[in-house]
Amino acid sequence: MRAAVYRGQQQLSIESVPVPEIGPGELLVRVESCGICHTDLKKIAYDLLPPPRIYGHETAGVVVRTGSGVNGFGEGDRVALFHHIPCLDCFYCRHRIYAQCETYKRVGITAGFEPAGGGFSQYVRVMDWIVRRGVVRVPDGVGFDRACFIEPVNTCLKAVVKCEVQAGETVVVLGQGPIGLLFTLLLVKQEAQVYVTDPLERRREWARRFGALAAFDPVKDPSAVGDAVARATHGRGADVVLVATAAPGIVEAAVRLSRPGARILLFAQTAPGERVELDGAAICVGERAVLGCYSADVDLQERSARLVLDGELPVEDLVSHRLGLNQIHAGIEMATHPDSQTLKIIVHPQR
């Protein structure tokens, strides 16, 4: 099969590699759609993990082989995949902090080499503990491009739930890339009053279309969003600020935009070595809560799947490019350096 193999030093190579062998309790899935995620971009850009690996984890496709003992799935089933699933029995699972579970940290889907998601290939091996809890059926009539949003929607829904966003609250989302726009969709559905920032006008247009009350350019007019939120809240500031992009000073800006007692959630600060310096009194005396949120939540799988598969969120509107596997280098470049036409990029490995 063909796969985009990460070879280190920011290099991906389109290669012919063996189709993965599966064992008892496992599935072999033909990958039809796999979204490019910014965590993949960071792993490639910063050489975060040793090569060789095959990345890609926002994956949907068709079961083509089942291992002995598999119940509930058969050849021809259309599925979407979660590459992390917790044990549900350890200290962190008992406290529902699933992403810190050691089993969760083990990637359970591979296209060969060290497991890394494998979606940038034509076939993936789904390991037994993922098969038991991390495979979602995709109904006939639902496209794979839509289905591969289930995992990223789950991660965003987890953040919104963690912030305990209430109807009528004023929420600012910093960044309106694909993840930021998913936040906007979820928050509007939650009946929050949403204000957003992004330097790209097209993304601001999409945010307004999705229900944001206002969208501002943080580069050309850095004070505009703060002024608008202050007017809307009688000078208090935002109840919640979600940081959906990484940029110098952006977390400090989130604190300034928030009211005393607000919740500030960091979603995009995922690369080791990223540093944030904050005014301690703004947090302590201002009684603000700074939260971290990473990856998916097994408790939210059914809810996130329903939002995507039932069409409650128009996720396919976010897709700007659909590329064959041989075009993945262009896709990585576009996702890393987006322009006004770039939103979600989906790879079709069978093309």
Image (cartoon, rainbow, N blue to C red):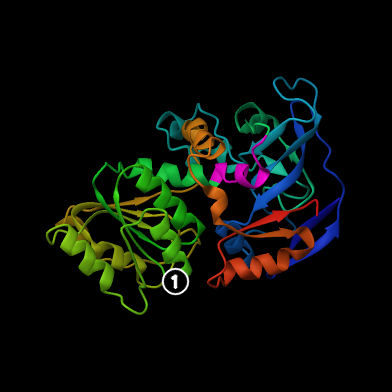
The percent coordinates of residue 297 (x first, y second) are 48, 38
Magenta segment includes 148: yes
Give the SS element for disc 1: helix
- Label 1 Cα crowd, 10 Å radius (few <14 / some 14-19 / many 20+): some
The percent coordinates of residue 329 (x first, y second) are 72, 67
Vertical order, 236 against 152 (above or below): below
The C terminus, quarter of image: bottom right
| Residue 313 in sight in this render | yes
Magenta-tinted stretch: 141-151
What residue is rendered at 81% in x and 62% in y? 14
Vertical order, 324 against 105 (above or below): below
Residue pointed to by mark 1 = 201
In screen coordinates, is 183 left or right of 296? left
What residue is rendered at 22% in x and 62% in y? 229
Return the residue found at the far bottom.
Answer: 220
270 or 1: which is nearer to us? Answer: 1
The percent coordinates of residue 160 (x first, y second) are 37, 45
Return the residue found at the far left.
Answer: 234
What residue is rendered at 22% in x and 65% in y? 228
What residue is rendered at 51% in x and 57% in y? 178
Amino acid marked by disc 1 = Glu
